[in-house]
Amino acid sequence: MNQFEATYQENYSRMFNIGLKMTNNEDVVRDIIQDIFEKYYLRTKNGNSISKPQNWLVKATIYSCIDWNKSRKRFKDYESALNQVSDEKQFAAIQNNNALDYALSKLRSKERTIIILYSEGFKYLEIAEITDMKQTSIGQTIARILRKMEKTLKTIDYEMY
């Protein structure tokens, strides 16, 4: 197995999980990952080295998903639609175990990125490198985001604990 195949196998599932949490669309995530690996292959084939391939691939996944969400907003104001969810839809979301997805949707894109990376088991140092933040502020940022999610979940009468 060559280096590209090994990198692909080591990173695909993690990239897929992150992309799915950010887009909620498996087909879109598969397309995004295919494009990213194509860029990665061309870049490494031309002799350019990537010092931390996993971080590069995850960062590319995150930014591609953010771009996809932004392009989607041009056609439909996604955020305002989420903010106007009726009580009935909120109840349905809870019944369908989508309460955490609902809370994630209420976060800003950088907050969502940080908490998704944290939930995927990335270390603080890795999260800092991927998000271009200081490592020392990651713990506080995660705690703040979790409190924000807890507050959102409480508004729909969902108990985290």
Image: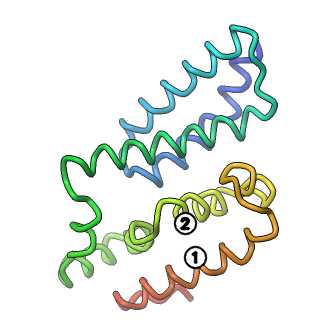
Secondary element under disc 1, as helix, strand or loop, is: helix
The image quadrant where one finds the N terminus is: top right
The three-letter code of the residue at mark 1 reads: Ile
Asked if residue 86 is positioned above or below residue 6 in the image, the reply reads below
- Give the labeled residue for mark 1: 145
Residue at 37% in and 71% down: 102
Q: Which x, y percent locates residue 116?
A: 58, 59
Residue at 38% in and 51% down: 24
The three-letter code of the residue at mark 2 reads: Glu
Q: Is residue 1 visible?
A: no
Residue at 49% in and 46% down: 19
Q: Which x, y percent locates residue 114?
A: 61, 61
> Residue 111's mark?
2
Residue at 76% in and 26% down: 50
How far is the residue under mark 1 from the one under mark 2? 7 Å
Crowding at dot 1, Cα within 10 Å, few <14 / some 14-19 / many 20+, comes out as some
Asked if residue 115 is positioned above or below residue 152 in the image, the reply reads above
Q: Which x, y percent locates residue 60?
A: 58, 37
Q: Nearer the viewer, residue 99 or 123?
A: 123
Asked if residue 71 is positioned above or below residue 99 in the image, the reply reads above
Crowding at dot 2, Cα within 10 Å, few <14 / some 14-19 / many 20+, comes out as some
Evaluate if marks 1 and 2 touch, with contact meaning CB atoms under 8 Å apart.
yes
Relative placement, left or right, of 112 versus 117 is: left
Lower position in the chain sequence, tag 1 or tag 2: 2
For residue 97, which quarter of the picture? Answer: bottom left
